[in-house]
Amino acid sequence: MNKPEEHMDIIGIHGVPRSGTNWLGQLFNSHPDVNFKFQPLFSYAFKDYLNEHSSTADIKRFFEEIAASDDYFLNLRDPVIHQNYPDFNKNEAYSTLVFKQIRYHHLIENMLSKNPVVKFVFTIRNPLAVMNSWIHTAMEFKPDWSLDEEWRNAEKKNQNRIEEYFGYNKWKEAVNIFLDLNIKYPKRTKIVIYNDLLLNTELTVNELFTFSGLSFDDQTRKFIKESKKRNDTDPNSVYKKKTNDDAWKRNIPEHIIEAVYEDLANDRLRVYLEQ
């Protein structure tokens, strides 16, 4: 296991489910100085470790413990979820802890306010593209569920759990959290649009690495090329060959598309329907 430097940088990647966080996480993981951890607060090892009122000491200890953890889930060794993930070369000592979450966005502000080191990258994807990806992922959207019943609040999936962010209304909640925190902490948060990551990958990753204090090297460049020329069928794969993100136009019923456009007509989130 790699050894941490005395003063490590900490980056949290947050986005709603099906918004590209798997790929973005592995783009960060491709850096040899990064110690990457997968959804720590969703793991058995660290579930419920933090809440909205966690202390400065609690948060510091959480980062230290996940950095040192050899838990199979955190370290991408779950045989069901982590199939065909890349294996990257790493330096003996890492400089940066990176963790990714698709849940627990309501805890971000407490971490920012009580830990001066942590930074966050928020990924935002068109809500209709998120919806389309969700309904085509059998593990997340069961065949006997009704899209008309589930698309707004995803009650069967979220089950009223505050940490879950499936469904259109939870997309809105999460993106508003991201935008508000980006205004409040502009030097410690960065928003990345999924479509920018898809269409201008190397440039976007360069900008994210600069924000994170990381250099851009050949291992990352090689992974970008490999991840975009191969197309795995696994919905959680980080290898997807596609040139646009508009499959939702063919797959989402027109009345739902119209409802989303109407709902966001005078909302600051309207811009993400065009991205």
Image (cartoon, rainbow, N blue to C red):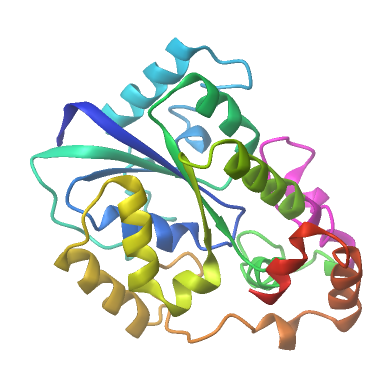
x and y, in percent, of residue 117 in the image: 38, 28
Quarter of the image for the N terminus: give it: top left
- Answer yes or no: is residue 233 visible: no
- In the foreground, 223 or 190: 190
x and y, in percent, of residue 251 in the image: 73, 83
Quarter of the image for the C terminus: give it: bottom right
- Answer yes or no: is residue 44 visible: yes
Residue 78 is left or right of residue 160, and the answer is: left
Residue at (59, 62) in percent of width and height = 18
In magenta, the rendered stretch is 148-169
x and y, in percent, of residue 200 in the image: 41, 76
Residue at (74, 45) in percent of width and height = 158
Q: Is residue 149 magenta?
A: yes
The image quarter containing residue 72 is top left
- In the foreground, 173 or 43: 173
Residue 216 is left or right of residue 268, and the answer is: left
x and y, in percent, of residue 134 in the image: 66, 65
- In the foreground, 53 or 39: 53
Compared to residue 222, the image places residue 41 above or below, namely above
The total number of labels drawn is: 0
Residue at (19, 58) in percent of width and height = 88
